[in-house]
Image: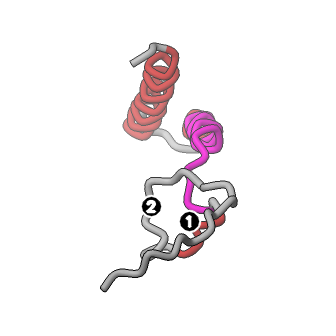
Amino acid sequence: MAATDIEPANNERAVVTHVDTAEVPSAEWGWSGESRRTFRIAGWFVAFALLAMIIGNHKGLIEDIYLVGFAALIVVILVRDSILRRKPR
């Protein structure tokens, strides 16, 4: 037979994550979130670093094409992300 006793409510603040705390115990403390700002800063840093690699002692231009292409791709992704984040869903 089921018990009819009422248990006291838990007044602790709930952490909103999309991670199951059974699989990732640190999610209970809020350590499983993503830092979008950190990813954006890292993306701009990598794009700048790729463009800075153009300066060097190489003679061929194939390396430059790949460096500029990958840097441009990263910049397009970052700009697209910032535009889409401004639009309401």
- Marks 1 and 2 in Cβ contact (< 8 Å): yes
The image position of residue 11, as x and y in percent, is 68, 59
Which of 16/69 is in front? Answer: 16
Q: Amino acid at mark 1?
A: Ala
Residue 73 visible in the shown view? yes
Assess disc 2: are there few (<14), some (14-19) or many (≥20) residues with their C-alpha within 10 Å of its C-alpha: some
Residue located beneath label 2 in the image? 19
- Which quadrant holds the N terminus? bottom left
Which of 60/86 is in front? Answer: 86
Q: Tell me, yes or no, whether the highlighted magenta stretch contains residue 46.
A: yes
User: Which label was assigned to residue 27?
Assistant: 1
Residue 4 higher or lower than 36, as above or below: below
- In the rendered structure, the answer to whether residue 72 lies left or right of residue 56 reads left
Query: Residue 19 is drawn in which quadrant?
Result: bottom left
Residue found at x 48% / y 16% = 83
- In the rendered structure, the answer to whether residue 12 lies left or right of residue 50 reads right
Q: Amino acid at mark 2?
A: Val
Which of 27/42 is in front? Answer: 27
Residue found at x 56% / y 39% = 43
The secondary structure making up most of the magenta span is: helix
- In the rendered structure, the answer to whether residue 73 lies left or right of residue 32 reads left
- Which quadrant holds the C terminus? top left
| Magenta residue span | 31-48
Q: Tell me, yes or no, whether the highlighted magenta stretch contains residue 49.
A: no
Q: CA distance from mark 1 to mark 2?
A: 7 Å
Which of 50/64 is in front? Answer: 50
The image position of residue 30, as x and y in percent, is 63, 59
The image position of residue 62, as x and y in percent, is 37, 37
